[in-house]
Image: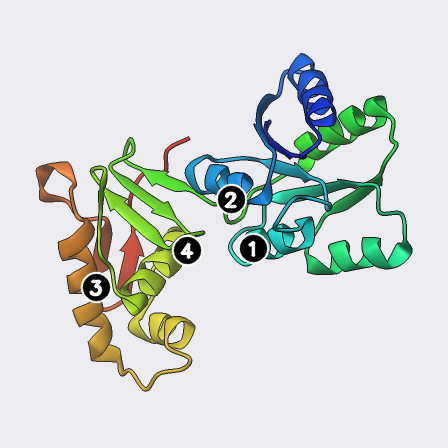
Amino acid sequence: MRILVVEDYKKMNDLITMFARQDGHTVKQAFSAESALELLNDTVFDICMLDLMLPNMQGEDLIQSIRNKSDIYIMVISAKIDVHNRLDALSLGADDYIIKPFSMAEVMLKLKNIEKRITIKSPLLMSFNHGDLVIKPLTREVIVDQISAMLTKYEYVILLHLVEHSNMILSRDDIQSACFSDSDAFDRVIDTFIKNIRRKIDGFKDNQSYIKTHYGLGYQFVGERDE
């Protein structure tokens, strides 16, 4: 698995990292919440292991920031033993809570069990067509051929909705109800948004588009997801 360890105490961070790498995992280290967010924005991870007591931005705020954008598995490893601290972290979206001091063997076993069943629903970086199109939900960035595409708020929301439902053909009504709950947009406006999105992101070879029109039915995102 691809693991991010977020722990400001270097010896602890290095120890977790060493054991995880010995078990065959790919590990990156962060020593603050801010550096963790930078890594999460640029790299795909399967699991984030984090301490709650971090400098500046606390672990609880980091969990909240991650959960606003992703369903990545979050494992808290903390010296906070109060049940309210555990409940707070879990209510914010953490998937597991381990209290320090802990057994490294137990943590590694947990990682093996997680690896058997983990599925990433909304990663923090999505790449398509060998990196030609990259979407970073954490910062709402869309990058085409390594250049930022300046999408408007609704263009971005529509694109992300299509990407997240790429196995489906979405009608104008589907897109309108999902993306314009706070707007009076009508269905033909969707066509204009799709046209603008295509103009900004399409870089396919052979004049293909990332968004396919199914006449009489709706639209479908057809970019090929990179591993």
Quarter of the figure with residue 160: bottom left
For marks 2 and 3 on the same chain, the one whose residue lies earlier in the sequence: 2
Give the crowd class for mark 1: few <14, some 14-19, many >=20 residues within 10 Å.
some
Q: Residue at x 62, y 21 (%)?
A: 25
First reached walking from the N terminus: tag 1 or tag 2: 2
Q: CA distance from mark 2 to mark 3?
A: 30 Å
Task: Check disc 2 and report its element: helix, strand or loop.
Answer: helix
Mark 1–mark 4 Cα distance, whole angstroms, equals 23 Å
Task: Count how many numbered circles sit on residues in the image.
Answer: 4
Provide residue 148's location: percent of width, then percent of height.
Answer: 23, 47
Name the mark on residue 65: 1
Q: Which residue is mark 4?
A: 165
Indicate which disc, 4 or 2, sits on the residue closer to the N terminus: 2
User: In the displayed image of the protein, which residue is found farthest to the front?
Assistant: 56
Find disc 3 in the rendering and name its residue. Answer: 194
Query: As shown in the figure, which amino acid type bears the numbered disc 1?
Result: Ser
Q: Is residue 43 above or below residue 91?
A: above
